[in-house]
Image (cartoon, rainbow, N blue to C red):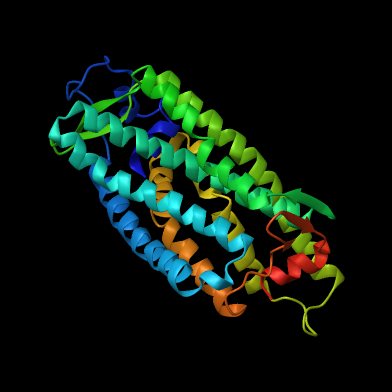
């Protein structure tokens, strides 16, 4: 989304000058942001599409397939909830900012920031779950789902509490190239942006490491063992890699590596991929459940009190896209 993208490159974009404005309720509209209108339109359409399909997935899970849910499904649903909240608060941000109500603006910026950090945390948890299931063997974890649920929803809370206590959330006013004024509720302190970048950087380093491990296992599985009498097709392996790329939130890294002549194109790539991320994850959810009759095959043995991970790593890779 646009605000998150502006945040990733606060020192290097015109939009970032809003981050260093004087700290008052509505800064003066003296900053012109190129491509803001088109990027906002893409974000709004993409987020709307993603919200619609994620709502369908949540409906399918909680009302139609609740009895068939397992740990992998629950983690994916938590990610859907976090992303759905992120989309809702992003789409309502402009309307709240236009009211001029400072308290409402602070609140919408806070919950938007919290949902973004929660989404990052669930990307981390998704990679952690894959790591425990695929790389580590014979691991027993008591109250596994309870612990990762607390991690996913509680970990971002202290950060937003600290930021709101120092008055880091305010309204920002920006000019578009057409002369229109756009208001948004977000973080106004450029130093706080580095905290967000650092938070995602930690997630990115971990998820990228797991992603590389997973791809390596895929290659090993292809070279060592045949599946159903034949080797996996390139299409299935490509689909698996793309699915992991989405599940681990690696699409957000596009903004981190955008510099020079690729800066503006990367904005559009970032906006399209992340605004439609919920839709892409819905396709993954539908494909996985359609293939294995409503149950993920990447789930360790579990009871109410403990989870034991004992599956062979090569067999586990093969079961992702059976």
Question: In the displayed structure, does residue 7 sit left or right of residue 303?
Answer: left
Give the residue displayed 51% in from the left and 30% down from the top: 197
Residue 213 visible? The answer is no
Location of the N terminus by quadrant is top left
Question: In the displayed structure, does residue 62 sit left or right of residue 312?
Answer: left
Q: Residue furthest top?
A: 22
Residue 118 visible? The answer is yes
User: In the image, residue 14 lies at what x, y percent?
Assistant: 32, 28
Question: In the displayed structure, does residue 36 sit left or right of residue 197?
Answer: left
User: In the image, residue 34 lies at what x, y percent?
Assistant: 27, 37
Give the residue displayed 62% in from the left and 61% down from the top: 72
Note whether 152 is above or below 214 in the view shown.
Answer: above
Give the residue displayed 30% in from the left and 53% down from the top: 42
Note whether 298 is above or below 184 in the view shown.
Answer: below
Along the viewing direction, whichever of 250 and 292 lies nearer the viewer: 292
Q: What count of labels does the image hold?
A: 0
User: In the image, residue 302 lies at what x, y percent?
Assistant: 72, 61
Location of the C terminus by quadrant is bottom right
Q: Residue furthest bottom?
A: 229
Note whether 317 is above or below 181 in the view shown.
Answer: below
User: In the image, residue 120 lies at what x, y percent?
Assistant: 52, 42
Question: In the displayed structure, does residue 224 sit left or right of residue 2?
Answer: right
Along the viewing direction, whichever of 215 and 294 lies nearer the viewer: 294
Give the residue displayed 48% in from the left and 27% down from the top: 159
Note whether 4 is above or below 133 in the view shown.
Answer: above
Using the rendered view, name the quadrant where residue 238 is placed. Answer: bottom right
């Amino acid at each position: 989304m646009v605000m998150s993208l502006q945040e990733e490159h606060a020192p290097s974009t015109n939009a970032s000058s809003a981050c260093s404005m004087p700290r008052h309720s509505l800064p003066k509209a003296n900053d012109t942001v190129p491509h803001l209108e088109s990027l906002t339109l893409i974000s709004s359409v993409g987020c709307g599409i993603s919200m619609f399909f994620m709502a369908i997935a949540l409906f399918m899970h909680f009302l139609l397939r609740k009895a068939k849910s397992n740990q992998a499904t629950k983690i994916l649903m938590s990610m859907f909830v976090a992303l759905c909240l992120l989309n809702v608060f992003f789409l309502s941000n402009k309307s709240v900012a236009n009211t001029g109500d400072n308290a409402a603006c602070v609140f919408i910026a806070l919950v938007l920031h919290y949902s973004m950090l929660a989404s990052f945390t669930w990307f981390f948890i998704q990679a952690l779950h894959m790591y425990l299931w695929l790389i580590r063997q014979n691991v027993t974890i008591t109250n596994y789902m309870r612990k990762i649920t607390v991690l996913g929803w509680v970990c971002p809370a202290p950060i937003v509490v600290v930021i709101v206590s120092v008055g880091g959330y305010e309204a920002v006013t920006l000019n578009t190239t057409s002369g229109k004024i756009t208001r948004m509720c977000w973080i106004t302190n450029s130093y706080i942006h580095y905290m967000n970048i650092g938070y995602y950087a930690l997630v990115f380093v971990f998820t990228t490491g797991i992603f590389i491990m997973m791809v390596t296992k895929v290659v090993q599985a292809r070279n060592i063992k045949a599946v159903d009498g034949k080797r996996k097709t390139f299409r299935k392996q490509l689909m698996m890699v793309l699915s992991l790329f989405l599940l681990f939130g690696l699409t957000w890294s596009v903004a981190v590596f955008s510099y020079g002549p690729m800066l503006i194109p990367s904005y559009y790539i970032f906006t399209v991929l992340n605004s439609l991320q919920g839709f892409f994850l819905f396709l993954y959810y539908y494909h996985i459940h359609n293939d294995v009759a409503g149950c993920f095959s990447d789930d360790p043995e579990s009871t109410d009190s403990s989870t034991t991970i004992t599956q062979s790593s090569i067999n586990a890779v093969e079961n992702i896209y059976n």
